[in-house]
Image: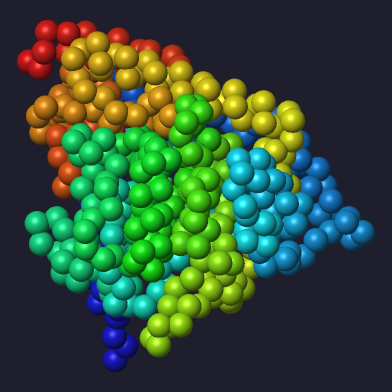
Amino acid sequence: MVKINENYLKLKSSYLFSEIAKRVAAFQCENPGREIIKMGIGDVTRALPGACIRAFHAAVDEMSADSTFRGYGPEQGYDFLREKIADRDFRSRGADISPDEIFVSDGAKSDTGNFQELFSNDVRIAIPDPVYPVYIDTNVMAGRAGDSRSGRYDGIAYLDCTESNGFVPDPPAEKLDLIYLCYPNNPTGATATKEKLAEWVEYARRNKSVILFDAAYEAFIRDGSIPHSIYEIDGARDVAVEFRSFSKTAGFTGTRCAYTVVPKSCNGYDSSGNPQSLHPLWFRRCSTKFNGVSYPVQRAAEAVFSEEGAVQTREIIDDYLGNAKIVRESFSSLGYKCTGGDNSPYIWIDTATDSWKFFDMLLAKAGVVCTPGEGFGNCGRGYIRISAFNTRKNVEKAMEKIKDLLKNGIK
Ligand code: PLP
């Protein structure tokens, strides 16, 4: 008899998106032909930048001739890409990261999900609420989360992100080992200041903890005072791992390319309390379980850093940020409290009622689909997330319908 990993049975069903799909399908069935605008999606809608497409094509052509063909690539990714990442994403911001501390991967989802494998099963995990669910679910699968009660797992320390802390948690008094942080945040759209990240870095140094910092939405930061990388904070190299992605930066959600930074000075500890660098452990993990991102995709990602690619990427993100501004201004003008949408593609809206009730009303009366906040955690109750990943036309149309519906309050 082969036994299963029973931790999988402790996972909560991915209720959120299936429930949304079910309610939208029921609405469509009852209202055939009625237009629906989906404002809940976390996937990009604009095509890859032209510079990336050209580099992609050229690299595919190289694969067609024996003289330029490439087979398995270097374990951590090609030098041409890692050197550009180190220079442009880190050194240009004063962050001391070298190319051999960068691991190119097929996604920040896989890396944020897999990185926990490097740590002992009894480490104390801290996870914000609301949150991108991957951090929780992968720790549940690994057997670290314990049992679930009232929407929370016993073995996880939840960091509440609420209006009162600006959706950025303070380091707690208790000692926690592995801390997940994500800024700009999905789902709240909130950003973390240098001072707040410095408090977390100081906490991690004091407690010999590690921060797993997800910066998948870094490219949406426009406010010059907000750090793009945790390594802009002194001392972070020794206590933080950072995850980045080309998905939201340059439309690679379907193409797949991301990277993880593991500084050589970032340590965990063995059972005797001796420091062990995480870099060789992650190298070993990647070279055992992963065979790299395809050559054409790495060439396409490299083109993001070309002069043309940088201009095109910025234009696309500015377009999404323009959508976000319209959403934020529309809801604010109706008297709703909004977070995010200025340095992030997500707007987190306090509905002052039940999230699912609000979801049903927007769908039934405006034909607009949003994401109920409670799907991201208990602290998301009463909120909805609206995404800026859409066409300008759809965003304007959706906001007109919502303004019409809500101008006299909720009916
Ligand atoms: N991290 C966060 C916070 C996300 O919201 C997402 C995708 O929605 C990812 C990571 C996944 O990125 P990737 O497409 O690189 O796997």
- Can residue 401 be spotted in the picture? no
Q: Is residue 407 above or below residue 305?
A: above
Question: From the viewer's perspective, is 271 left or right of 227?
Answer: left
Pinpoint residue 240: horizontal percent, then vertical percent: 47, 59
Question: From the viewer's perspective, is 216 left or right of 104?
Answer: left
Q: Nearer the viewer, residue 266 or 218?
A: 266
Which quarter of the figure has residue 394?
top left
- Can residue 326 be spotted in the picture? yes
Query: Where does the N terminus fall, quadrant-wise?
Result: bottom left
Pinpoint residue 292: horizontal percent, then vertical percent: 64, 63
Question: From the viewer's perspective, is 354 left or right of 57?
Answer: left
Q: Is residue 379 above or below residue 127?
A: above
Residue at x 16%, y 66% (from the top left corner): 154
Pinpoint residue 200: horizontal percent, then vertical percent: 36, 52
Q: Is residue 176 above or below residue 184?
A: below
Q: How many marks?
A: 0
From this viewpoint, which residue is outermost toward the right? 67
Residue at x 67%, y 38% (from the top left corner): 304
Q: Is residue 375 above or below residue 207?
A: above
Which quarter of the figure has residue 25?
top left
Residue at x 29%, y 77% (from the top left corner): 122
Residue at x 28%, y 60% (from the top left corner): 126
Colouring style:
rainbow
Pinpoint residue 348: horizontal percent, then vertical percent: 28, 31
Q: Nearer the viewer, residue 138 or 34?
A: 138
Query: Where does the C terminus fall, quadrant-wise?
Result: top left
